[in-house]
Amino acid sequence: MLQRLKINGFKSIKNMDLELRPLNILIGANGAGKSNLISFFKMLNEMMSDRLQQYIGISGYAHSLLHFGPKVTPQIEGELEFEFGDATYKYHFSLRHAAGDTLIFGEENLSAKGLENNSRLLLLRDSLGSGHQESKMIDGVAEGLQTAIPLNYLLSQFRVYHFHDTSSTSAIRQSCYVGYNKLLMSDGGNVAALLLRLREDNNIVYQRIIKTIRLIAPFFDDFVLEPRGNNVILNWREKGSDQVFGPHQFSDGTLRAICLITFSAGYQYLLAKDKNVIKQIANGELFSRDPQTLVTTRLSTDDYGGLFNRSRNMWNIKLFYENLKHNFSANIRGIYRGKYGLGDRNGNLILDQDYEYVQGFMTWNMAVSKEFFNKNHFT
């Protein structure tokens, strides 16, 4: 989990040191910097996808990203602190203004602190250098750096969802391709396809979403998700009526809530493999060596486990209870991550052995709230 975030010199954020919790809500006036904080995570997402220079160009180049421009602020600094397993990991970087009104890395450092095998204190520090235009995180993973492998996974998980556009022409109110049903898009444009898949493949989660929507829209009964050809639209039905309504008849607030609720409960299946590795295996070019016997065998496609740091199965569940009479509420959330490859241990640079996996695990978060005194009385 991301525990702490430091930002210096990014857009309207001169300097910030923020401690984070599992759920964080930003409240502020227009222009206070809420959207700029969110866009920092968008930049991180592009950095981890080797698209930093593209992001800089699309954003109006470096002077639009530096706080009051390069004359006032010559560089952006960021530091993210994660709690992961039994260790604390830090990713620190700086982006300096360079010729052509772009940004290059002034530094890119990784560190880890924790206990190894629940006994020995583990302290690791690695530098990925300076002067490069794109992050060298993936190079650190390829080199097998113990700091780079978990940090690459953690930083690659950032997703920015923005459901602000609920106009009549927004993607949420249009039909979408039924095959776009694996993950919710950043603008919620495929929410109908995702809900259709959940209804057919994971009805328990689907029904939980329906019940949650009814808490904020008591008139709502159910969705009417009927594909027409290869497309489906977010039609719905009101309680006590057989009439079918379209997404244009949802209020803006209800539509945004539906996207948020759909995002908070679901299942993900991901099968990510390198096509070049598959081709090499098919050509008989990849082998595996047993570290005990040193016997070498040719790999088959069944031996290949896919990309490192990618779990095939992930799901989450969130339960919420509220007692208005006694001013009491509680929620519990469980997140399951299936087994994933941590790093190569037999020298062939691919995932192919059971001992290269981290076993699947479950994490639980629980919160309880009780109001004891309410001094706001109106007559």
Image: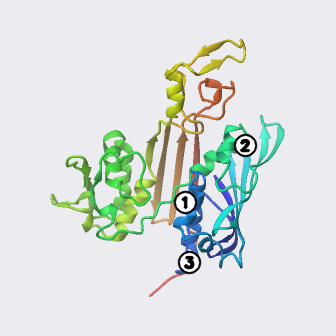
- The type of residue carrying mark 1 is Gln
Quadrant of the frame with the C terminus: bottom left
Q: Which residue is mark 1?
A: 54
Q: Which residue is mark 3?
A: 28
**Residue 290, above or below 350:** above
Q: Quadrant of residue 138?
A: top right
Left or right, residue 13 beside residue 201:
right
* Residue depth check, mark 3 versus mark 1: number of the one nearer the observer: 1
Q: Quadrant of residue 77?
A: bottom right
Visible in this render: residue 42?
no
Residue 244 screen position, x and y as percent:
18, 59
Of the pair 103 and 149, the residue shown nearer to us: 103
Q: What residue appears at the point 58 percent right and 49 percent down from the top-left corner?
A: 156
Residue sitting at the far left? 242
**Residue 121, above or below 208:** above
**Circle 2 sits in a helix, a strand or a loop, which is it?**
loop
Of the pair 212 and 56, the residue shown nearer to us: 56
**Mark 1 burial class by Cα count in 10 Å: few <14, some 14-19, many 20+:** few
Q: Distance from label 3 to label 1 (Cα)? A: 30 Å
